[in-house]
Amino acid sequence: MTFLNIKPIAWAFSLITLGTEMLNSVFSFYYVKLFLHLYKVSEVAFYQAQMILMIWNALNDLTGYFHNNSKADCCSNRHSSVLYGAPLCAAAFLLPWFPWKYYHEGDWLSGLHLVVSLCAFDSTLTFVQQAQCVLFAEIFTRYESRLQLIKINQVASLVGSTSILFCGLISDNMEILLNFQVIAVVVAILATASLYTGMCHLSHLEPKRSPEENLFSETVQDLPWTSVVSLMKQILTQKNFRLFLIVNFFQVFHLTFFSNFMMIFVDNLIPTDVLPSSIRSIMYGAGFICPQCLVLISQSWLRKFGYYKIILFSFYLEGTASVVMLLLGQQYYYFLALYLTVIMVIVQASFCLFNLPLADMVDADLLKFNRQSPLSSMVFGINALFTKPAQSLAPMVILSRLNQFGYGNPNESTILDLHDAMFNLICLVPLGIAAIQILVWSPFSIRKKTDYTGVF
């Protein structure tokens, strides 16, 4: 595949990104506020739901093996995974926004509703995204082609991220639930159409595999579990992969922290007369739209410095911004709003680049062990298995901390302490995570294609 004919393939691939981004950004940003504020789910039920999600993720992420070994067409074929998964993912996306009845505070049914919504959406989204990630590593094998795909992909992510903005403006940041439900249905329909269109085009444009590659793929599907465990051990023995897992775990935790609680922090720390609802909606939208713009304009930096230095610089930037905001204090409302937006943008933008080192590690594993075909599904599956628990831990840890200061039942005597706790969280959590990521990411040694050998 030459560099010239990558563009139509990249645009088809980006339509899949557009669909998943529309669904995932809205779901992760709004579901916590929906269940805590509107459905009044109890603290215990919220923790139980997150714990069940963690266990479910561990089982769900075994699809890394399942994709390689299943004989079913919907699983063994990447294209079929997206085509089968698209309508299921859209249906699961709609689950939380429609209450099963009028919920009273602490209603057990609202807790069950949360569990079903989280597990259903996570399963279907993982099914689609893992197939997409594997296609990324297997189709786009050159660093230049991956950079071009990242650029085109970010255009799709930018468009998809606008769903946050429109949902906020039309529903008055979820104050008008009926409006939100209508826009959610529209988002689900558009996302499904985007996923189908992208996958159909990609199946026609993707280079055909050689008979030798198809033969090896068939033998991989026949591997026993003992061989699969052995392959997993080989992957996990690689130092760079272990370092990446740690960094990615904290990145997912950081991203989930802000995605789930940004609205709650802003509602409590910034008065409405300082920042009206429409401006808040634009601010929330900017937190998801600007990262894509930042990645788009940083293409020349990526070519010049590589993703390693760009990601490392983002960690230093997050830490510096956190220290500055901590020194300024929470009374500077406009600086606080700017800080929250900037941190969200940096975390999202750097996370957008994480597929580059992960795909490079697939290539490095291929060369190190002289494999005939890349173990893309297994590498991406192991990554998900170790990092996805952060999506459940983040809301559990943060909500537990907030409830210590009366978040569930705030009153005049505890409200100031609650605000102080929130401000400390939004400053100290990014600072702590940035420090850990700098220490762990610094020894990462795969920084360009020529670094694949002799680094383990």
Image (cartoon, rainbow, N blue to C red):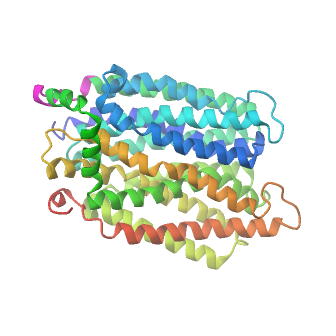
Left or right relative to 247: residue 333: right
Left or right relative to 261: residue 25: left
Picture coordinates of residue 173 (x, y %)? Answer: 71, 44
Picture coordinates of residue 81 (x, y %)? Answer: 38, 26
- Direction bottom: furthest residue: 327
Can residue 259 be found in the magenta stretch? no
Closer to us: 389 or 258: 389
Left or right relative to 237: residue 385: right
Residue 277 vertical position relative to residue 198 in the rendered view, above or below: below
User: Which quadrant of the structure image shows residue 238?
Assistant: bottom left
Left or right relative to 337: residue 213: left
Taking the spot 21% from the left edge, 43% from the top edge, the residue there is: 141
User: Which quadrant of the structure image shows residue 69?
Assistant: top left
Taking the spot 61% from the left edge, 46% from the top edge, the residue there is: 50
Picture coordinates of residue 431 (x, y %)? Answer: 53, 71
Of the 4 image quadrants, the one containing the C terminus is bottom left
The number of numbered badges drawn on the structure is 0
- Direction front: furthest residue: 226
Taking the spot 67% from the left edge, 42% from the top edge, the residue there is: 168
- Direction top: furthest residue: 73
Residue 366 vertical position relative to residue 7 in the rendered view, above or below: below
Q: Which residues, given as a range, are shown in magenta?
A: 204-213
Inspect this view and state whether residue 270 appears: no
Inspect this view and state whether residue 214 appears: yes
Can residue 208 be found in the magenta stretch? yes
